[in-house]
Amino acid sequence: MMTGESNKCAVCNEPASKRCQRCRRSWYCRREHQVSDWQSHKAQCNAIAADNSHAIHKMEFDRIRVRYGLESPENAEKIAEMLANTSGGVSAPEFASMFGMSTTEAVVFLEWIKIGVKFKEEVLDGAKNSGLS
Ligand SMILES: [Zn+2]
Ligand SMILES: [Zn+2]
């Protein structure tokens, strides 16, 4: 357990022992204050939660990418081609069997690509550069 300097209720500034279970950053002295703070905390909370899951997702994506050598030019090209042909709609099992990964991993990978990311730009740019587009 961390000894908290900052464990003060976000509403009344009293010592707080409960925190938002979602973002784990905002502290409250009692449930009523958490509830009453929700309207103003919601946006921040969503941002933090999204950020956390984003970071975890990115880590997982990188792990998969390295593990299955998806960043090799050959595979990057394959993926780019696939995405170009299916507008991102390739199924996870299909993708999984293509690269010998589990469906769960394929889901993580494809989700991340859908979220819109650098890797997609990289592979699509790579594809363009290699005359695939
Ligand atoms: Zn309070
Ligand atoms: Zn929160």
Image (cartoon, rainbow, N blue to C red):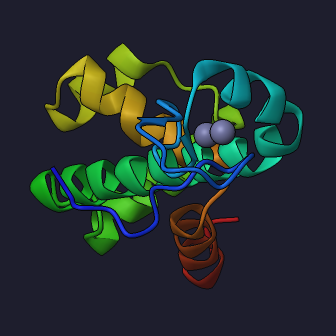
Q: Position of residue 21 (x, y in %)?
A: 47, 30
Q: Which residue is outermost to the right? A: 39
Q: Quadrant of residue 85?
A: top right
Ligand 1 rendered quadrant:
top right
Q: Position of residue 29 (x, y in %)?
A: 55, 36
Q: Position of residue 71 (x, y in %)?
A: 29, 68
Of the pair 59 and 96, the residue shown nearer to us: 59
Of the pair 75 and 104, the residue shown nearer to us: 104
Residue at x 32% of width, y 62% of height: 4
Residue at x 27% of width, y 31% of height: 105
Q: Position of residue 125 (x, y in %)?
A: 63, 77
Residue at x 79% of width, y 36% of height: 37
Residue 73's place in the image compared with 34, above or below, is below
Residue 51's place in the image compared with 125, above or below, is above
On the rendered structure, is 124 left or right of 119? Answer: right
On the rendered structure, is 93 left or right of 14? Answer: left
Of the pair 94 and 36, the residue shown nearer to us: 36
On the rendered structure, is 6 left or right of 30? Answer: left
Of the pair 119 and 2, the residue shown nearer to us: 2
Q: How many marks?
A: 0
Q: Quadrant of the C terminus?
A: bottom right
Residue at x 53% of width, y 34% of height: 20
